[in-house]
Image (tube, rainbow, N blue to C red):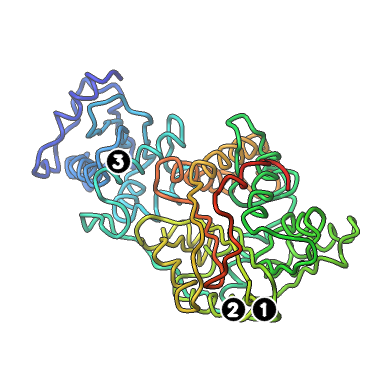
Amino acid sequence: MSPANLQSVSARTSENRPPAAGDEPAAADPLAQPTTACRGAGGQRAWGIERWLAHRLLRAIGRPPIRLVLCDGQEISESAVAPVARILFRDRATFWKVLLNPSLQFGDAYSDGRLEVEGDLVAFLEAVHRARIAAGTTGSRLPVALLHGMHRAQANTRAAARENIHHHYDIGNDFYRLWLDNEMIYSGAYFPTADTTLEDAQRAKLHYVCRKLRLTPGETVVEVGGGWGALALLLARDYGVTVKSFNISKSQILHARRRAKAEGLDSRVEFIEDDYRNISGRFDALVSLGMLEHVGARHYREFGQMMHRCLGPSGRGLIQSIGQDQPSDTNPWIDRRIFPGAYPPTLREMSDLFEPSGFSIIDVENLRLHYAQTLHHWLERFEASAERVAGMFDARFVRMWRLYLAGSCAAFAGGALQLFQVVFARPGMNEIPWTRSGLYTAETGP
């Protein structure tokens, strides 16, 4: 349908009052053939109120350039520009569920196949993110009661944290191996050039982190949340340091230990299955990539106390975390289906890691677009392996993870999510570079 036709559909149905329940769709609409699921009590096509509420929903999220296609074929839009996607509701029940709780029910309906997205999924989700940001309707400031459903993640106690990590990371190393890089690094990469491969970009990220930490041979490093072990192994192999890496994912720990033994690094790298709150000992440096998101803001002071306890007088550290510009409750679909207990902090919230323990923030960098590019690679590889993923799990799992990866890509590209790298040190520690030029002298090595 052309933009002109789009405007005519919008003009017919954008009254400020709810249309009467018995209003019929215009006969000229070629898709306006209701199914049984679209009929109301007594056989009437009760789409007047639904049309009105669909317009209200689109206005509430900033009038993105999309069309909502009700199950009787009517198309609803609030934008005058060409749509990037059409959202098809298979039945009335799905429309009402999404309307009343979009933050949870959109993801479930898409996963179940009760809702389809015609068009580029990432472009659609990015358009929604950008419209909401432009309209000031992100996070908890959604303007209408119909858009309830935001959800504060549960506290990550020791027991809850283990359960949450198990839910996401212990679903099978073979699954992650299908679409991550060959080192299985599950955090945002660093792309020195636009055409850098994912493998080279992840390797560049690890070296970039090490240059920021200014490591020297013989030092000791504690890693918090070590994933499948790539960073800890590189630290020992290429920088001559001794590493203790803490993680509570059993699958990741076993994989990392096997790698350390195979590479002859198990005497210099110890992978420990334990909670960050139990870390003890003294270290020269601390590093954590993509783990703070699982801590929860109410536990940041505990995390900061651990850093204070473990870092020596010249100690320094780097924390990389997904973040956001303004505090917003966790999306319930992400929390329940993908990442239970996760919360992306703001920079202000991250200060609770440093201020109470007297650490100085040395450097802050936002690598948001690098994470968007990382996710683009992940999603492309995931789609190439979709049939194998379906064989491991089922079709619903494929759609669920497709939405998760596409939504994350759109959130970073559209500015709804950030990627913060924060370097910190003990106060008064003057062994810091005069300029940042040294970070860029070797993009892929020490």
Residue topped by disc 2 = 306
| Amino acid type, mark 2 | Met
Q: Secondary structure at mark 3?
A: helix
First in sequence: mark 1 vs mark 3? 3
Quarter of the image for residue 254 reads bottom right
Image point 22% across, 18% down: which residue?
A: 4
Q: Secondary structure at mark 2?
A: helix
Considering only vertical position in the picture, is 36 above or below 433? above
> Looking at the picture, how far across and down is residue 145, in whole percent?
22, 58
Considering only vertical position in the picture, is 162 above or below 237? below
First in sequence: mark 3 vs mark 2? 3
Which of 382 and 399 lies nearest the eye of the viewer?
Answer: 382
> Looking at the picture, how far across and down is residue 60, in whole percent?
23, 47
Which of 47 and 319 lies nearest the eye of the viewer?
Answer: 319
Decide if residue 202 is on the left or right side of residue 295.
right
Decide if residue 175 is on the left or right side of residue 51.
right
Of circles 3 and 2, the one toward us is 2
First in sequence: mark 2 vs mark 1? 1
Q: Quadrant of the N terminus?
A: top left
Q: CA distance from mark 1 to mark 3?
A: 43 Å
> Looking at the picture, how far across and down is residue 410, in whole percent?
45, 41
Decide if residue 101 is on the left or right side of residue 441.
left
- Marks 2/1 in contact by CB < 8 Å: the verdict is yes
